[in-house]
Amino acid sequence: MTAASPVLRLSGISKSFPGVKALSEVSLELYAGQVTALVGENGAGKSTILKVLTGIYQPDAGVIEVDGVEMRFASPHAASDAGVTAIHQETVLFDELSVAENIFIGHAPRGRFGLIDRGAMNAQARALLARIGADLDPNVKLRDLGIASKHLVAIARALSVDARVVIMDEPTAALSYKEINELYELVERLKAEGKAILFISHKFDEVFRIADRYTVFRDGAFIGAGLMTDVNEAQLVQMMVGRAVDQIFPKRVHHVGEPVLTVAGYSHPTEFAEISFTLRRGEILGFYGLVGAGRSEVMQAIFGITTPSKGACRIDDRVVVIRSTAEAIENGIVYVPEDRGKQGAVKGLPIFQNITLPSLGQTSRSGFLRLAEEFKLAREYTQRLELKAASLDQDVGLLSGGNQQKVVIAKWLATKPRVIILDEPTKGIDIGSKAAVHEFMAELAAEGLAVIMVSSEIPEVLGMSDRVIVMREGRIVDEVAGPDMTPERLVRAAAGIAEVAA
């Protein structure tokens, strides 16, 4: 690999917020035709440096250079004009606009009298979509697309400007296996075009597959950088967390007890059919399947977000009818959703209020909220989860992804549930936070809580579950336990691949 000069270099970048030093003299170099992986735990400073690179934040100190020339990104437009574009983990798109309008918003081609040339815009959008292998109609409204297709529109939008530096922030989080491989092919094409790519991911298999270089941040500081060929997974983890992580999945003593939740024949006209299973006290029951298998939809029905067309639910020996989330909570069932940003946490409210929202009966007297009781309840569960925050008054929206997840889990644990449903509990969080969430899940099960874990990560499913239910196209297609829990069996069942006779 040639030792060319970097296209973009950051030196001594620092950024502080009230009570928090997010970045402390960090450095970063990006090279043409190469992928640099930026890795670190949540709270390491990755999101802050991304916002510095895209002109959302201005650093308190440090230097940004493009081709050796010092520059200042005073706004996102300034960063874009310098050739820096980003594909964010949580894409900001507009449902009521067309695919083409979303791609070219703010820089649409113009015709006579300065009016938008819709013919040229649609043609250019079609060419961009073809370039990334997205078979989408530029005229279709964004609201009619699925999550993965919306993500591809965001990629096309980022490429619609002539960028020299492309930042990809957790780009595969909402993509299927096929779409992930197509994204890898896109990255290779961008490298061949000479783009400098910053790739932010918590998935080590991705990092080692496509990255040429790595940079590690920890607690807002630069820890190290180098070539991927010179580092292994254990060394990278140790740099990230400051310690060796030998056991991502904690060993558990199994004390599975009596049935707590029994679901029989749950069906929905469009989402799932004939879902039946039993969950026991102290058990972690994994649900695995490909994108669109219907796992989340089943969990939302159990939690009362949607109503099944038929089927029965039992808590212990009681038949219960759950028509709302309030009824689910009253029956001891809580749900930590996959999209914590929109469905789990209330951004704009402080941490302590997020945690006490479902438990106001515990923190009020005679209809009046007692602030001291709210703080006491919030403190109890944030300490158990080792939440990292400046204070319990901090806006939950300012927390890292992993810490937001901890707030959502704390919120529901404060209701003292009997069944907790965790939908993709470690999606988009770093390896250190994953280990902490796994450890806490094991503790919950050991205390007798019944846990359902929906996950798309096979190592997590196999490492944490006592049993695994596999779904495909809205139906349960397999249930495995013990030595039968193998990656091959899960993938075959989820993909509908028949066993080949010996």
Image: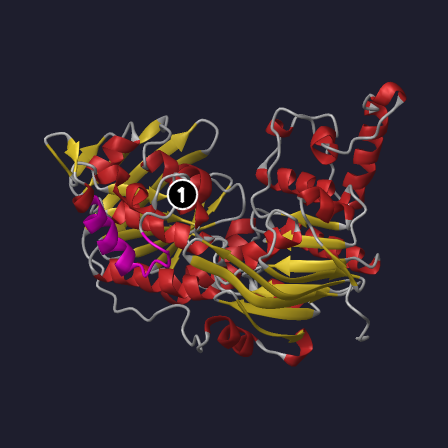
Per the image, label 1 sits on a secondary structure element best described as loop
Q: Which residue is at 68% across, 75% downward?
A: 227
Q: Specify few, some or many for label 1: CA neighbours under 10 Å numbering under 14, 14-19, or 20 or more.
A: many
The answer to which of 463 and 55 lies nearer the viewer is: 55
Residue 475 visible? The answer is no
Which amino acid lies under the numbered mark 1 shown in the image of this protein?
Answer: Pro
The answer to which of 458 and 71 lies nearer the viewer is: 71
User: Which residue in the rendered view is the most extreme toward the left?
Assistant: 366
User: Which residue in the rendered view is the most extreme toward the right?
Assistant: 112
Q: Which x, y percent locates residue 352?
A: 29, 46
Above or below, 444 relative to 154: below
According to the picture, the residue beneath numbered tag 1 turns out to be 337
Above or below, 251 relative to 289: below
Above or below, 156 relative to 142: below
The question of residue 409 being in magenta is answered with: no
Q: Which x, y percent locates residue 3?
A: 80, 75
Quarter of the image where the C terminus is located: bottom right
Determine the image quadrant of residue 277: top left
The question of residue 387 being in magenta is answered with: yes
Determine the image quadrant of residue 147: top right
Q: Main secondary structure of the magenta part?
A: helix
In the picture, measured across the screen, residue 386 lies left or right of residue 370, that is: right
Residue 427 visible? The answer is yes
Q: Which residue is at 62% across, 78% downward?
A: 231
Magenta span covers which residues? 374-391
